[in-house]
């Protein structure tokens, strides 16, 4: 599957993709991450949900992304929230930021789109000795017959190249990558969470996924969306729908 262009679905992305929940930020202390006053680089920042959460909690944040459209939306949302985040249009593997100037480097819901070895090297370069690389995900969870399961089957029918379904929300590869990249004191954090979605919001959330509007042309997106709307009405008449998710995060410390 080719790399999706989330800028093509910026409106749905901003409106309907649930950002990391407050519990995620509140739980980081459990893996010895202190946000207050920290200098953070958020790779693949997208619409800035992680960056904004960090800034709200007292961090000095720079967001990195390749999409001008998503960055503009992130800046708009920052202004509404009354927080300041700096943004740089650059790849995660070559940010152009100064060496050893940051306490934390993060990647939320995007690590799988990077060239891992190059991203690990860049994170190590950016971090001060003892600084932290935090890789996190917030995944929907397919269970037999639930709304995620039916939705994933529909994505596969409309986009056979999409191969990201069937996950369980756990990402041991994050830990493997941290260790392979020379990071030590590896910790992990995980918890399940149900997220309520209206029918309209779930359709928007799914359109904003890698397998739909970020990859398919508009006419195929419309066909998919119409079919999903019909399936929701038939099989999940309750509105909103409780959609199971899992947060998973792994962190490791730079040896300098």
Image (cartoon, rainbow, N blue to C red):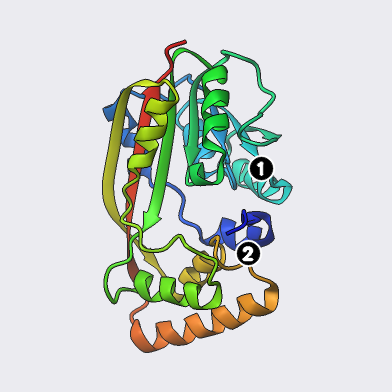
| SS class, disc 1 | helix
Res 251 quadrant in image = top left
Measured from the top left, where is residue 120 in percent x and y?
51, 28
Measured from the top left, where is residue 201 in percent x and y?
49, 69
Above or below — where is 21 with respect to 90?
Answer: below
N-terminal-most mark, 2 or 1: 1
Q: Residues within 10 Å of mark 2 (few under 14, many from 20)?
A: many
Name the residue rendered at 49%, 82% in the picture: 229
Name the residue rendered at 57%, 19% in the picture: 126
Above or below — where is 63 with respect to 158?
Answer: above
Q: Residues within 10 Å of mark 1 (few under 14, many from 20)?
A: some
- The dot on residue 182 is none
Above or below — where is 223 with respect to 128?
Answer: below
**Which residue is tagged 2?**
215
Image quadrant in which the N terminus is located: bottom right
Label 2 vs label 1: CA separation?
25 Å
- Number of numbered markers: 2
Nearest the eye: 191 or 176: 176
**Which residue is tagged 1?**
75
Res 140 quadrant in image = bottom left
């Amino acid at each position: 599957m080719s790399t999706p262009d989330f800028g093509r679905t910026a409106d749905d992305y901003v409106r309907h993709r649930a950002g990391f929940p407050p519990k995620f930020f509140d739980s980081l202390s459990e893996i010895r991450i202190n946000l207050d006053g920290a200098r953070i680089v958020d790779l693949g920042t997208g619409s800035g949900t992680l960056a904004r959460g960090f800034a709200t909690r007292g961090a000095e944040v720079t967001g990195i992304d390749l999409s001008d459209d998503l960055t503009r939306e992130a800046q708009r949302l920052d202004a509404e929230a009354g927080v300041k985040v700096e943004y740089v249009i650059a790849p995660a593997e070559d940010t152009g930021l100064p060496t050893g100037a940051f306490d934390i480097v993060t990647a939320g819901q995007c690590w799988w789109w990077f060239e891992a070895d190059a991203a690990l090297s860049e994170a190590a370069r950016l971090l001060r000795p003892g600084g932290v690389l935090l890789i996190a995900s917030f995944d929907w969870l397919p269970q037999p017959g639930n709304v995620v399961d039916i939705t994933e089957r529909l994505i596969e029918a409309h986009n056979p190249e999409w191969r990201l379904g069937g996950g369980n929300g756990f990402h041991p590869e994050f830990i493997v990558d941290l260790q392979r990249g020379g990071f030590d004191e590896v910790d992990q954090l995980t918890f399940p969470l149900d997220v309520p979605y209206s029918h309209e919001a779930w359709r928007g959330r799914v359109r904003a996924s890698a397998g739909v509007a970020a990859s398919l042309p508009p006419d195929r997106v419309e066909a998919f969306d119409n079919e999903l709307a019909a399936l929701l009405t038939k099989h999940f008449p309750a509105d909103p729908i409780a959609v199971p998710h899992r947060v998973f995060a792994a962190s490791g410390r730079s040896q300098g």
